[in-house]
Image (cartoon, grey):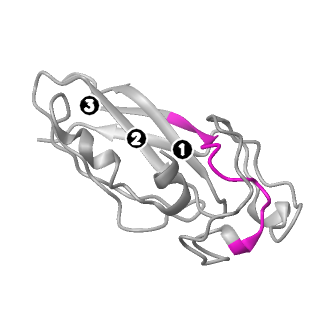
Amino acid sequence: MAALAEDADTTGLNQFQLGDVDDISEGTGPILPGASASVDIEAQNRRRLVSVASMLVVTNDAFLARKNIRLPSRSRGKVSYFARAYDAGSENNDESCAYIPGPPCNNPFKKSDVPGEGYVYIHSGIHGIADLAPAAYDWRNPVARITIERIR
């Protein structure tokens, strides 16, 4: 999850396409606040769960996640869930643009020398301690609505 949270690197997650995973699908780029994106997945009829994870831009190691979301039944063709922001705990949260990929900082693959907390926890948002203004970049949970619609 750290690679996903830091640089949107899904290489490590793609290994899960073995065994109990039918499909892995990736988005095409950043989703700005208020915008939406669609991703198609295919699942066998016996599958009942889906998990979602995504990097949060304007942070050095935040991500959103929701696991084991129940897929809609045939009679309930559409369901929605909310996802929280988590801190991967892999980097120090100094809010310095030197270590934040994506807009407005655009510094992918640069890591802080100061280690993170070493564990995953609910992210507390942007506090304005360096380059990021909370008025422009802060958030509160939940950070995303995930809508799943059964299609044929």
Residue 89, percent across and down? Answer: 65, 43
First along the sequence among labels 3 and 1 = 1
Rate crowding at label 3 as few (under 14), some (14 to 19) or many (20 or more) other CA atoms within 10 Å. few
- Region in magenta: 82-98
* Quadrant of res 96: bottom right
What's the amino acid at mark 1?
Leu
User: Does label 3 or label 2 sit earlier along the sequence?
Assistant: 2
Q: Residue at x 56, y 48 (%)?
A: 63
Mark on residue 77? 3
**Residue 95 sits above or below residue 149 on the image:** below
Label 1 SS: strand
Which quadrant of the view contains residue 20? Answer: top left
Secondary structure type for disc 3: loop
- Looking at marks 2 and 1 on the same chain, the residue that comes earlier in the sequence is marked by 2
Amino acid type for the residue under numbered disc 2: Val
Type of residue at label 3? Answer: Gly
Residue that badge 2 annotates = 52
